[in-house]
Amino acid sequence: MAKKSILNKKSIEFLEKYLNNAAPTGYEWEGQKIWMDYLKPYVDEFITDTYGTAVGVINPDAKFKVVIEGHADEISWYVNYITDDGLIYVIRNGGSDHQIAPSKVVNIHTKKGIVKGLFGWPAIHTRKGTSEKAPKLDNIFIDVGCTTKEEVLKLGVHVGCVITYPDEFHILNKDKFVCRAIDNRAGGFMIAEVARLLHENKKKLPFGLYITNSVQEEIGLRGAEMITHTIKPNVAIVTDVCHDTTTPMIEKKTEGETKMGDGPVITYAPAVQQKLRDLITDTAEEKKIPFQRMASSRATGTDTDAFAYSNGGVASALISLPLRYMHTTVEMVHRDDVENVIKLIYETLLKIEDGETFSYFK
């Protein structure tokens, strides 16, 4: 008998719309509007801040506060230099991969609207054997079909315009979600689904739940760093993506072994509070939710670090979604893992019962 999916048609439609929308670091607001519109029926109120982090709140008057969090921004490029011949050189906005750029179509965001362009690259016929150059940040360039700098400027393109890829959501082989920006728009999706399940199952929480979609993670966890001082939570459960390390050219001895389809990944790291982590793993075992483990040497590199070390210390944990081809336009995750991250967060929240539980985390 096939298992019942917790994702419905409306969920998938939201995921597709949310992923297809461009929300580069520093320009997340249109995506946040989509996210807040979906979340609105399931929360009591919203908090937003100056830079665009959005928080849906359930039980805003409760004494104790729990955050569940993902981040809303995606990697992108900035226009950095326009040549006299009308070609555009770029710098990163987040961890954009220069090696995947050649031959990719791009959207340049201007006040006049989207300007289409492409990353050009010399034809294979003109590259000479052992001396041919690999793509690097200083030799990739965008062509918008202009032959002068003046033409480019007339299109509305100028230094500082942000550039994204237009690649859109699709499902591969029935259960693999593929798109750019799954890192970490999937996080915002999963925490919104937790809120939906709480609402539909009429669960009453004895604490305030702060469903937090942070901005600017890709350039240093900045959104989480700001919003945690506004919320001042007692507990934070962060979700992000991690690497599926089973594809070619990844060394498991250094990266560990985590695999798409084998369940959520629970991190062991100094920033992860061990009592909260144990609550999560115990919940997974009790509810028969498959999970994996990974270790981070110093920092998790996720918003977990920002929450953990704020406000004198916040009990924080990280649940990750295994993903293939991170920071490319074909990021891939397994539908089962998405559902199991949602289930694990949902079931863990139901284990946090009252004030005594919060004192346990100290």
Image (cartoon, grey):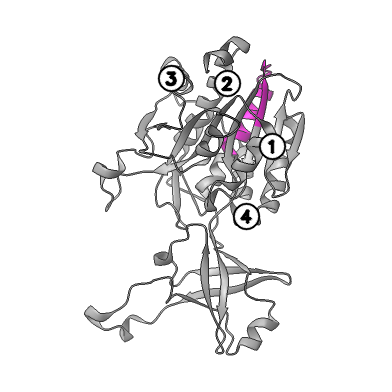
Label 2 amino acid? Answer: Leu
* Residue that badge 4 annotates: 23
Q: Residue at x 45, y 36 (%)?
A: 320
C-alpha distance separating marks 1 and 2: 17 Å
Residue 206 included in the magenta stretch of the image: yes
Label 4 amino acid? Answer: Ala
- Going from N to C along the chain, the mark reached first, 1 or 4, is 4
Q: Residues within 10 Å of mark 2 (few under 14, many from 20)?
A: many
Magenta-colored span:
189-210
* Residue that badge 3 annotates: 278
Q: Quadrant of residue 267?
A: top left
- Mark nearer the viewer, 1 or 4: 1
Q: Is residue 106 left or right of residue 278?
A: right
* Residue 270 at least partly seen: yes
Label 3 amino acid? Answer: Asp
Q: Residue at x 55, y 15 (%)?
A: 351
Q: Are marks 4 and 2 in contact (CB under 8 Å)?
A: no
* Residue that badge 2 annotates: 349
Residue 359 included in the magenta stretch of the image: no
The percent coordinates of residue 115 (x first, y second) are: 64, 73
C-alpha distance separating marks 3 and 1: 26 Å
